[in-house]
Amino acid sequence: MEMLRHLFSSGDFMPHGFCYLWNPGLVWLHLVSDTLIATSYLSIPVTLIYFVRKRRDLPFHWMFVCFGTFIVACGATHMMEIWNIWHADYWLAGAVKAVTAIASVPTAILLVQLVPNLTSALVGANCLVCQELSFYSVTMSWAHAKS
């Protein structure tokens, strides 16, 4: 319980706005930038979910879940930056960053492991396309010769 109270306590810290000397231009710059970044980060997983639902045949759909989790966590760090302009909840911001790290490290490792498999799958798919094009070309040549 003490840990939760500590997590949501601002203690003797000051909000970032004081570091910015409450300069309106600087506050707005950070506010708008972090808002746009957070909004973008939160919209990307929605698009990924839509894509994966439309393409259920993807052999690596689980990677999109990893990306989505990582990207939502990144968006949360920017939302905390906005919050901390006026509030000094740096322990909570640190916890959000820790969650982001926990999401990002496995995502990076899994992506590195996935790339060789993905490359092989794409080479195989390209070979199939080449075979289909060759068959199509032969068929068209034969049909043209018959006419």
Image (cartoon, grey):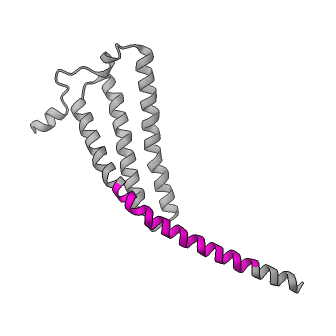
Identified at 31% across, 17% down, the residue is 19
Q: Which residues are magenta?
A: 109-137
**Residue 59 sits above or below residue 104 on the image:** below
Does residue 134 belong to the magenta stretch?
Answer: yes
Numbered label tally: 0
Q: Nearer the viewer, residue 47 or 64?
A: 64
Q: Quadrant of residue 88?
A: top left
Does residue 33 belong to the magenta stretch?
Answer: no
| x and y, in percent, of residue 46 in the image | 46, 50
Residue closest to the far left: 2
Q: Nearer the viewer, residue 80 or 120?
A: 120
Task: Report the quarter where the N terminus lies.
Answer: top left
| x and y, in percent, of residue 51 in the image | 51, 57
Position of 95 with respect to 30 (left or right) is left
Q: Quadrant of residue 95?
A: top left
Q: Does the rendering let one see residue 68?
A: yes
**Residue 85 sits above or below residue 125 on the image:** above
Identified at 40% across, 52% down, the residue is 67
Task: Report the quarter where the C terminus lies.
Answer: bottom right
Identified at 66% across, 77% down, the residue is 132
| x and y, in percent, of residue 122 in the image | 53, 67
| x and y, in percent, of residue 11 in the image | 16, 24
**Residue 68 sits above or below residue 122 on the image:** above
Q: Quadrant of residue 143?
A: bottom right
Q: Does the rendering let one see residue 60?
A: no
User: Does the magenta stretch mainly form a helix, a strand or a loop?
Assistant: helix
